Image (cartoon, coloured by chain):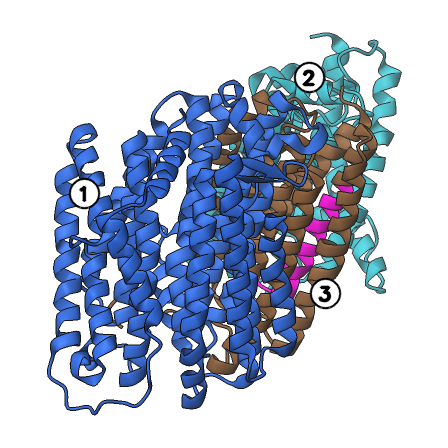
Chain colours: A brown, B blue, C cyan
Amino acid sequence: MMSLDLQILNLLAALFLLLAFAMLSQRRVVGLVDLLAMQGALLCAATLLLAWRTGETHLYVSALLTLTLKVAFLPWLLHRLIRRLGVYWDSETLINIPSTMLLGLLIVIFSFGLAQPIAALASTATRNGIGIAVAVVLLSFLTMITRRKAMSQVVGFLSMENGLFFGAMSATYGMPMIVELGVALDVLVAMLVLGVFFFQIREQFDSLDLHHLESLREDK
Amino acid sequence: MELLALLAIPLGGAVCLALVGARRWAPEANVVLSLATFLAACALTARVIDVGSLTAAHEQFFIDPFNVFLVTLTAFVALTTSLFSRPYMRIEREHGRVQPQQLRLYHSMYQLFIAAMLTALTSNNMGIMWVAMEAATLSTVLLVTLYRTPASLEAGWKYFILCSVGIAQALFGTVLLYFAAEKVLGAEGLTALLWTHLNAVKGELEPAVLGLAFVFLLIGYGTKAGLAPLHNWLPDAHAEGPTPISAVLSGLLLNVAIYAVVRCKVLVEGSLQSDLPAKMLMGFGLLSVVLAALFLWRQRDVKRLFAYSSIEHMGIITFAFGMGGVVANFAALLHMTVHSLTKSAIFFAVGHAAQKTGSQLIDEIRGLITLSPTVGWGLMLGSLAILGMPPFGVFASEFLVLTTAMRQEPWATPVLLVALGVAFAAIFGRVQPMVFGETNARRLPHPPALLPVFVHLGLVLLLGVFIPPYLADWYNRAAGLIAGQ
Amino acid sequence: MSPLSWLTQILEVIAALAVAPLLMGWVAQCRAWLQNRSAPSLLQPYRTIRKLFHKDAVLAEQASALFRFAPYIVFGAMVCMTAIIPSMGTRLPLSDAADAIALVGLLATARMFMALAAMDVGTAFGSLGARREMMVGFLAEPALLMVIFVAALISSSTALPAIADNLATQTLGLYPSLAFTAVAFLLVLLAENARIPVDNPATHLELTMIHEAMLLEYSARHLALMEWAAALKLFNYACIGFALFVPWGVVTTGTAENPLVLLAALPILVLKLAIAGAGLALVETVSAKLRVFRAPEFLAAAFMLAVLGLLVHLLLGA
């Protein structure tokens, strides 16, 4: 019988996976950003719990970083962008939602299989989370592929980063602090660049539908 | 000390230019900063020649013969590009294609880009290297979309999304690398991600994990290097941005990406003791060469044409690194150098040609020899150089690659020869009418800044005919380091 | 095969037959409370069934023997199900005859005959209801099977009494896999029992009917049996849910053979049903009815949750 904190960690990992699936089926862009914020909150909670369990101080700092960046700042920035750009709904997805979910299930099975040998070598208590992290990364990838609005693709990308972070946490109790700070800085700058970018796209095309961005071909 | 200057000057310059980049003397300031960076790089090189490999800042930075020449090359091409960009961007501003306040962004991002590349090259910490690579992409995204045309926005979007997704895979690879390293080196003291330490213990790292890590790292950094089939962003991004940016992206950023791949390959080969990394590199390299050679035939835009040529040459370099051994590595390092110099020279010439004719389409540029002899000759010589005509340096490195391939991987030789031949025909067939065709346009009064072009081509010629002994010795040492001796 | 186990068996069936209409009345009462209206009395379903038995059956001219026998088959399938589900005790002599997968088969039999009979008469509403019912059933069955598989994996047996035994004796803890499958089971329950958000049990509008459409042609004793069978279906589903997720209060195999313990299980069952009924009414009141072509997404979500629960159990061991 596992200890309580390990049970809670498993529950958080399972909910993390569920949120990635929920993103696949969510049509409202505002809903997507809220799901992203929830993912960040789960990540922060899991890091805090892990920090309490292992006593490593850098995990506390990491949790604080996740909280400020992924739960507070980035969702706020994205909501502000949504309001100013007026993108509330996504267009039809590439394949219909039940098929997307079935494909997602196949991806999850594949990721669990892929992560088995790595998890077998890990020494952390949360090593089973590696499979979930790989699954979330691939599911976010699927979200990015099947969406048409630029904002949804960006949310998929951020969800991929969350998955990678979770993987780092499960496999090695987080990366060295300096690397985590660097990654956080990169994500932040990427979002700021994107904000500017969206305005440029909207100014040019009057819409954030990515179909307008498919005209460059070989014999242009 | 030199290292600190090397990194602090462009970084500080970026901050300054963010404030004053719209002034009339901003391009000159840009040149001065690039010159200072180049001098710091030379000083660092002199130090390394004296002392050998050195580490700095608690081993977070590491300079050895492999990356010091890349650092100098980067600083040099950055300097010449800033020299080229001075009159070029002035003309663009006069033509109205770019607003004055956009130049502030342009100049500060240029310096930031150089700083990011230099950090990636000199970092010993694999995680910081990743952060710097991503920073390099981010600093150039807004530069690719500088002209705000629909095509450039599309190019910028593809560049951003594809490179970011690719580099996220590289992050996962780095996490796996850290995971394997932590078992052997322990998590204390931040040594688990330092390349020097990893290199020392690479035999003890877990092969299964490193194999998987290498796949992710190759896909990630390979996307940034433009290896097929992950190259889709490259032609668009290199063609739609301003020409100085195309020059540095083609000439410098691709090199840094290949550098990252090679560093990882050294570690993984030591751990796996098999030739899986080598085979993967060779496969991707050959695929890039073949695909690029075929796609060259369909190009109608001159900058896209040369962007595909970059993909082809990156393929050759990757193939050579994949073959391994001192000779092939030497050839690859030489090729990295001459390709940087030649490609940026070509882009300089092409940029002026496009400015004079007002279009980037091959069909609309004709008779450059009469329009502006310097541009015409620059483009002709540059194309000949990049196509591997002797006595230019590209011939020397391609020759070395082909002979090594004939000895070690005979099956690849016909593929390479045919691809190179196809590419030769495609590019030459398109450049020849551009330079020598008939045109009724008048000679335009813009004096082109073509000193950089001829300096680069001169260096390439020199490297083709006679490699200075210290440079050859250097390449040898770097090649030996990579081959694991 | 002790006399007590036979007593458990018979008591279960009788309790099911007796309590099922009361459950329907209770759910209607809770819905009324939540919607601030007054409901018919709790015993109204009994009165309805009694009234219907006293009437004369009217059959369409084209109705075949299938139409006449279908209500008996459906009712019989539901009664067989009550015999296998451990609602009050897990020592059931008849449970060896069929495990949880056969349970799903019984549900499928009932559904099939109901649909065939609806199409038998040849009216538009009948075919409409039959088609929609089969679509919902076809998508709900894999989800239900997945839920049972997860529970079976945890308990190493597919017989429902064995599963209930195992889960009742496990230590209390957080099981994400069971949490996911519980939600999936709830979604399947809503779909299969013609509840909002999939179907409105009180509507007779063509746009929205699924279950009611199949009953339109029936009258008198046939209608009474079909209504009773629907009530039994809800009761059975509730008891399956209790056996899988809330098994405490059921007389497990380890306890002593004592009739008093058995009698104590009945009030516990009624209490669980009351809470479940109130919960169901709450869910129905809070949700809006889905458009019919969104029902596959709803059920795909249920299937996906169930498979996720399975995968999470395999990966995390929780």
Residue type highlighted by circle 2? Leu
B406 displayed left or right of B108: left
**What's the distance in space between the residues labelled 1 and 2, CA to CA?**
85 Å
Residue where numbered disc 3 is placed: A76
Q: 10 Å neighbourhood of mark 2: few (<14), some, or many (≥20)? A: many
**What's the distance in space between the residues labelled 1 and 3, CA to CA?**
57 Å
Residue C107 in the image: state x and y as whole percent: 55, 36
Residue range in magenta is A26-45
Instruction: Decide which of B39, A187 is in the foreground and name it.
Output: B39
B289 displayed left or right of C289: left
Q: Residue at x 71, y 52 (%)?
A: A38
Instruction: Report the disc number at residue C92.
Output: 2
Residue type highlighted by circle 1? Phe
Q: Residue at x 12, y 47 (%)?
A: B418
Marked residue chain, label 3: A
Residue type highlighted by circle 3? Trp
Instruction: Decide which of C166, C210 is in the foreground and name it.
Output: C166
Instruction: Decide which of C54, B300 is in the foreground and name it.
Output: B300
Q: Are marks 1 and 2 in contact (CB under 8 Å)?
A: no
Picture mark count: 3
**Label 3 secondary element:** helix
